[in-house]
Image (cartoon, rainbow, N blue to C red):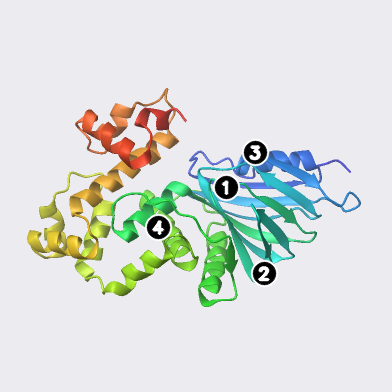
Amino acid sequence: MTNPTPHPIADEPDPSSRTELFQTRDIEQARQWGTRTFCENELRNIDVRGELNASLLYRKYGSIGIGRMSYGGEVTIRPSTFDDFYLVQVPLSGVERITHGNETITSTPTVGSILNARQQHEIIHGAGTEKLILRIDRDLVERLCGQHLGNGAQAKVEFEPAMPLDSASGRRWASTMRWLFDYLDGTQSSSALLTAQIEHMIGSLLLISQTSNHSEALNEDRSRSVTPAFIRKAELFIEERAHEPITVGNIAEHVGVSVSSIYAGFRKYRNTSPMHLLKSIRLNRVREQLLRSEPKSTTVTAVAYRWGFAHLGHFTTDYKRWFGESPGETLAR
């Protein structure tokens, strides 16, 4: 039998939306499409008598990607340390053993897993195992965490690696992954607004569904008091209009309260100001655009001006403080 070559089933011109299907019986081809879709990896067939039949249906949508995959036989995967994303895995059948440092978890249809960014893992994928996987950008998760905490800056997030899927929150997360996989079936393109809303929903649900180093603060923030509706409405207005020259007066007028109420509300319930939130959103939008752009096709100055930063010196200082690197270094990645 001739080994089929991995191939995309959709050549989507928009790089933020792509569907790919791979199927192969060749372990090197399987390793290559793992590298192409996720990161560099070592892949070894444990049971040489078993038959490898690797398959992946993967759909990329903005800052997230959802897929269904299996290797058929028993294999060991050692992905390289990845900095840019988290990988969430929900087994549909079979079993995996995932090791990080001295900790090993056994992942089954009742126990999912999260591979954290900046960590080294080894995965033993059992024969007959099939799983849903979600790749979600680290920048998205950390930006949303900062927004929920109200500090206006990205917060480094480290999740517990084991995700109970038989709890209420685990069942909700697993059903959301199944919904997302089905929803993106055949989706070729979408509006930027809808993409942002789906990213926000998935990232926020992950933060409240899975234990992390910020769970206590996130839970305290939700239980501290009920946030007035005008604050949430103002945040949505700022998020959607970040590309426009909006003022606190515009925000107050939109939500129907005074300017002083806007300032007082953000200070009490978010521990920040509306303009600080706007700056953080714009800085994150700049970073997202720089990461997607080629140095030959754009400049830092052009992107900064696009998002309302007229003073490049102040912009560069703020950017370095937010992200730990210069905007030029981000563009050069």
Q: Which badge, 1 or 4, is on the more N-terminal residue?
A: 1
Q: Residue at x 60, y 76 (%)?
A: 166
| Residue type beneath disc 3 | Glu
Q: Judge from the rendering whether residue 193 lies leftward or rightward of residue 203; answer left or right.
A: left
- Crowd rating for badge 4 (residues with CA inside 10 Å; few <14, some 14–19, many 20+): some
Where residue 204 appears, x then y in whole percent? 42, 61
Between the residue at mark 1 and the residue at mark 4, the CA separation in whole angstroms equals 24 Å
Which residue in the protein does label 4 denote? Answer: 200
Mark closest to the chain's N terminus, 3 or 2? 3
| Residue tagged 1 | 119
In x, y percent, where is residue 271? 23, 59
**Residue 4 in view of the camera:** no
Q: Can you identify the residue that label 3 sits on?
A: 40
Say which label, 1 or 2, has the lower sequence index.
2
Q: Nearer the viewer, residue 299 or 260?
A: 260
* Residue behind mark 2: 109
Q: In the rendered image of this protein, does residue 189 appear above or below residue 220?
A: above
Q: Looking at this view, name the residue that lies furthest to the top.
A: 296
Q: Of marks 3 and 1, which one's residue comes earlier in the chain?
A: 3
